[in-house]
Amino acid sequence: MNEKARPTRIAPVVETQLGHILHRDWPQLATRVTITRTVLSRDLRHAKIWLDINGADPERILKKMQENAGKMRTALAHSIHCYTTPQLKFFRDENPEYARHIDELFAKIKAEERQ
């Protein structure tokens, strides 16, 4: 079995299960957070998870996610049944925010062309 393929196969499972855990145990965070990307290390011990955060204070929401990472990891261990459960590290995904900004610029240009 290709060692590079395993993290690629398991990452969507981790992402999906983590989404279920968020909705079940942290609904107040789940309404403000969307998991956009998950990358696992080759040994499956570390997971980097990028989040699109909607809300008034994205840094506070990211901090809350990081504070609850241990509890989320424990719940994840019960749901994925792997030999090792990855340490969860959360990052704010800037790409959706940048895309929204670009869309706003295009809308502004179209509005100016119509005038």
Image (cartoon, grey):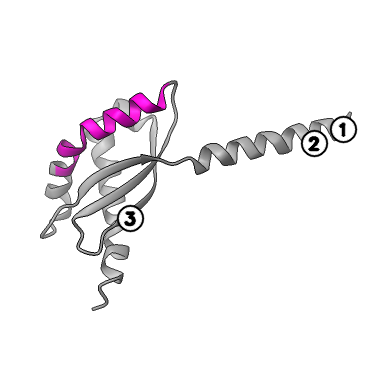
The residue sitting at 33% across, 55% down in the picture is 39
Number of residues whose C-alpha sits closer than 10 Å to that of mark 2, classed few (under 14), some (14–19) or many (20 or more): few
Sequence-earlier tag: 1 or 3: 3
The residue nearer to you, when weighing 27 against 107, is: 107
The residue sitting at 27% across, 28% down in the picture is 64
Please say if the residues under marks 1 and 3 sit with CB atoms less than 8 Å apart. Answer: no
Q: What element carries label 2?
A: helix
Measured in 3D between alpha carbons, the distance from the residue under mark 1 to the one under mark 3, in whole angstroms, is 44 Å
Q: Give the number of the disc on residue 39.
A: 3
Q: How many labels does the image show?
A: 3
- The span picked out in magenta is 57-73
Number of residues whose C-alpha sits closer than 10 Å to that of mark 1, classed few (under 14), some (14–19) or many (20 or more): few
Residue 95 is situated, as x and y percent measured from the top left of the image, at 51, 43
Please say if the residues under marks 1 and 2 sit with CB atoms less than 8 Å apart. Answer: yes
Residue 111 is situated, as x and y percent measured from the top left of the image, at 80, 31
Please say if the residues under marks 2 and 3 sit with CB atoms less than 8 Å apart. Answer: no
Q: Which residue is under mark 2?
A: 110
The residue nearer to you, when weighing 82 against 89, is: 89
Sequence-earlier tag: 2 or 3: 3
Quadrant location of the N terminus?
bottom left
Q: What element carries label 1?
A: helix
